[in-house]
Amino acid sequence: MSSHASDTPVLRTDRLLLRHWDPTDPDDVDFLFDMYARWDVQRFIGRVPRVMESRDEALARAEAWAGHGDVAPFGIWAATRADDGARLGSILLKSIPASGPTEPLAPSGDTEIGWHLHPDAWGHGYASEGAAVVLAAAFGAGLDRVVAVTHPDNAASQAVCRRIGMTSLGLSDTYYNTTCALFEARSMRE
Ligand SMILES: CC(C)(COP(=O)(O)OP(=O)(O)OC[C@H]1O[C@@H](n2cnc3c(N)ncnc32)[C@H](O)[C@@H]1OP(=O)(O)O)[C@@H](O)C(=O)NCCC(=O)NCCS
């Protein structure tokens, strides 16, 4: 992995190493394109889901995301398997926009956690393991509350929320001008 200006901290678990996406690494860009070009991955993401259509889009995303960790503990991590470096997907901790009348939507002041794994990596507990360490880092850095917004039909993602100890708050229109099944986690300090 080459170095990059991003301050996204490297996070480790028993099986995973979470690092920043590297736009100068063609294998990172190829992986992102392969993952986000799949309807199975995209179908529950965004207000109007669409698959990624070109490798240039993947490159632009890697470039944008590589700089996303400038303010710790926020980041968009490449989740990789610790023993062989295999890329598994993305884990995100970022500010979340509020619903509102104007685009771009204004920040809500809240923080969201999210996860997108390549289908080859589903069913191993990797998303939950990676999300748990990101959540711990968020609380370790002093955040009080982290939310997750899931498509109401996205049972797999809601299961991740529950596995990492998040609480269901039911359906909500608070964020992204859409109705989601909302989950939250609160810092133990509260
Ligand atoms: C949401 C998503 C990340 C969930 O992935 P996942 O692999 O099901 O989630 P986990 O990492 O928690 O893995 C749990 C599964 O691994 C299995 N598993 C195997 N070994 C395990 C282990 N050591 N520890 C925990 N779970 C393990 C569990 O039994 C479970 O399988 P099951 O759902 O068939 O019972 C994945 O479906 C995805 O990327 N979807 C597309 C993108 C998306 O919708 N993202 C969410 C947007 S809100």
Image (tube, rainbow, N blue to C red):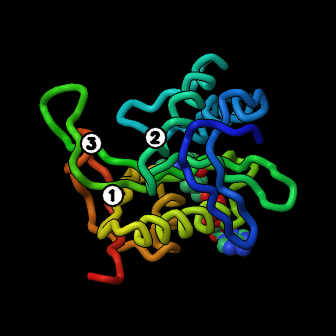
Q: Secondary structure at mark 3?
A: strand
Is residue 184 shown left or right of residue 72? Answer: left
Indicate which disc residue 181 carries.
1
Q: Residue 38 is drawn in which quadrant?
A: top right
Does the CB distance between marks 2 and 3 fall below 8 Å? no
Q: Which residue appears at 23% of the width and 42% of the height?
A: 107
Type of residue at label 3? Pro
N-term mark: 2 or 1: 2
Is residue 26 shown left or right of residue 103? Answer: right
Q: Is residue 144 above or below residue 1?
A: below
The response on whether ligand 1 sits within 8 Å of label 2 is yes
Is residue 10 shown left or right of residue 164? Answer: right
Indicate which disc residue 65 carries.
none
Q: Is residue 28 above or below residue 157?
A: above
Type of residue at label 2? Ile
The quarter of the picture showing ligand 1 = bottom right
Is residue 31 shown left or right of residue 75? Answer: right
Where does residue 189 sit, x and y in percent of width and height? 31, 83
Distance CA(mark 1)–CA(mark 3): 16 Å
Q: Which residue appears at 36% of the width and 71% of the height?
A: 185
Where does residue 18 sit, x and y in percent of width and height? 65, 55
N-term mark: 1 or 3: 3
Q: Residues within 10 Å of mark 3 (few under 14, many from 20)?
A: some
Where does residue 128 sit, x and y in percent of width and height? 58, 66
Type of residue at label 1? Ala
Indicate which disc residue 45 carries.
2
Where does residue 113 sit, x and y in percent of width and height? 43, 56
Tell which tag, 1 or 3, sits nearer the viewer: 3
Q: Secondary structure at mark 1?
A: strand
